[in-house]
Amino acid sequence: MIVFGAVVVTAIVTTTLAVMVAAVMIATIVVAAVAATVMATLSTTVMAAIAATAVATLAATATVALRIGGRRGQLGAVERQMIGRDGKRQRGRSAQSEPDELAERKFLHLFSSFDFGMPNPPLARKVEAQPGRS
């Protein structure tokens, strides 16, 4: 009887251990599959965000280059029109010698018109009057 009891106990323990090992293996496979899915989704999301940022940066750079334009080697310079200080209209390559201060004003105006997602854009913020100054 004792030998039979030992065999039964050994069989129960072995079966229990086998079931536990199988459960751990199944849980490991499930966790690995979930982790792989999450990582794939995260990687896709991160790659999409990087691609969107790159496209937005290129679009903003092209916009700035087209808006500022006017100097040799910059976009938008060839078909540029401007009225010179003498009041005469200049077209094409003669308009490429745009004064630096005008280009700087255009640049500041361009960026002051963006709100950058903030309530008060940095360049468009009104300067508060300081006490004691007029």
Image: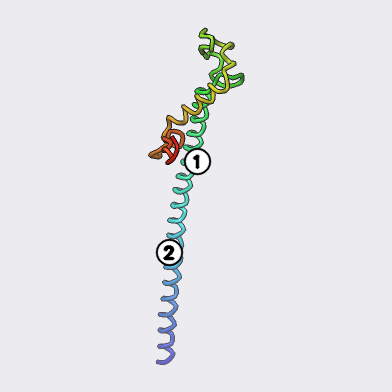
Judged from this view, the residue extending furthest toward the top is: 88
Q: Give coordinates of residue 112: x percent, y percent.
A: 45, 31
Q: Which residue appears at 51% of the width and 13% of the height?
A: 82
Q: Is residue 9 above or below residue 26?
A: below
Residue located at (46% from left, 34% from top): 123
Q: Amino acid at mark 2?
A: Ala
Between 60 and 72, which is closer to the camera in this rendering? 72
Question: Of the residues tagged 1 and 2, which is closer to the observer?
Answer: 1
**Residue furthest front as drawn:** 132
- Determine the secondary structure under disc 1: helix
Left or right relative to 12: residue 62: right
Return the mark for residue 41: none
Query: In the shown orientation, is residue 104 left or right of residue 126?
Result: right
How many residues crowd around disc 1 within 10 Å: few (fewer than 14), some, or many (20 or more)? few
Q: Is residue 80 above or below residue 48?
A: above
Image quadrant holding the N terminus, namely bottom left
Q: Going by the picture, which residue comes out furthest to the right?
A: 72
Q: Is residue 23 visible?
A: yes
Residue shown at 46% from the left, 41% from the top: 49
**Residue 22 x, y percent position in the rendering:** 44, 68
Q: Quadrant of residue 10?
A: bottom left
Which one is nearer the viewer's eye here, 103 or 70?
Answer: 103
Say which residue appears at 44% left-offset and 68% top-offset: 24
Q: In the figure, 74 relative to 37: above or below?
A: above
Q: Camera-side residue: 106 or 71? A: 106
> Which residue is under mark 1?
50
Question: Where, quadrant-wise, is the C terminus in this rendering?
Answer: top left
Residue placed farthest to the left in the image? 119
Q: Nearer the viewer, residue 7 or 33?
A: 33
Q: Position of residue 40 (x, y in %)?
A: 47, 49
Q: Which residue is mark 2?
A: 27
Q: CA distance from mark 1 to mark 2?
A: 34 Å
